[in-house]
Amino acid sequence: MLSAKSLFQEILDNDDSFRLFCSIAASGESQGGWENARIAALVPDSERAMAPKITRHGADEDKHGRIFNALLKKRGLDPVPVPPETDYTMLLEKHGIGLAHDKLKADKPLTVDDIITYLAHSRVTEQRASEQMIMLRKYFADDPVIGKAVRMISNDEDNHLAYTHEELLRFAAAGHGRQIQATLRECALAEIRVYRDVSLAVMDHMGRVLGWPRAKAAALAAGIHAVYAWERFAGWRRMVSLTMPERRDALGGPATSAPEFA
């Protein structure tokens, strides 16, 4: 019987599939770290108080990339190139979601509108990340290989999600509510399409690595399409709501260090 736990356990148990999984995850996290570092450097003067939080956000993402690479190293594996069709972060940028890399590579300060775009993009993608890590925590929190990493990354993603809620609510109270809702909706609808496409691509690569029979691959693809259909109909709305989080000032302190996996 197919289940999230059995599927991930199969990926975890095979060196080649584990290497691909960690390589994809590490690449995305490292890219997120670079983006946040650039945003922190370019924050407009009116929002300079946000810079330390954005810096911590980026530091957490960098840490996650190091964690995935450390898991590979512990197993004696090297990262592999990330197939472009599985690159979630870059595909979102290609679809115009978030701040364009050309803008982040320039030295021109960002605007308040840019910061709202960044926060809306983060609100949507951190929802996805938090949910994925909650699933992994449910099944693998006590796993001797990845349990420590899962617990730490899951806690960080929950902090990131809380931070985006709190900051967007602050901007909404300052009169940016309509802009925020429009941007959140645009981001959410684009994200669910990219997530579907990336999920299909990742499962295709994993299927070839693990030698899945056609019936199994078809069942997984059907499940991915079913999730997309639900998200397109109503599920995207969970990504655009804003509520004051229980974790206030979630990124108000220094980033925690990566655990040792030696």
Image (spheres, rainbow, N blue to C red):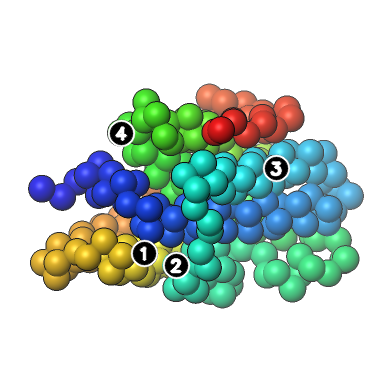
Question: Which numbered disc flags the more N-terminal residue, 4 or 1?
Answer: 4
Residue type for callout 2: Thr
Residue 139, label in figure = 4
- Marks 4 and 3, the one that precedes in the sequence: 3
Farthest front residue in view: 76
Residue under label 3: 59
In space, the residues marked 3 and 2 are separated at their CA atoms by 23 Å
Horizontally, residue 164 falls left or right of residue 194, namely: right
Quarter in which the C terminus is drawn:
top right
Q: Callout 1: 10 Å neighbours few (<14), some, many (20+)? A: some
Q: Residue at x 34, y 68 (%)?
A: 205
User: How far separated are the C-alphas under marks 4 and 2?
Assistant: 24 Å
Amino acid bearing label 3 = Ala
Q: Residues within 10 Å of mark 4 (few under 14, many from 20)?
A: some
| Image spot of residue 148 (x, y percent) | 48, 29
Residue 164: give x, y in percent of width and height.
Answer: 60, 42
The disc, 1 or 2, on the residue closer to the chain's N-terminal end is 2
- Residue at numbered disc 1: 202
Tell me the residue that label 2 is attached to. Answer: 86
Mark before the other along the chain sequence, 4 or 2: 2
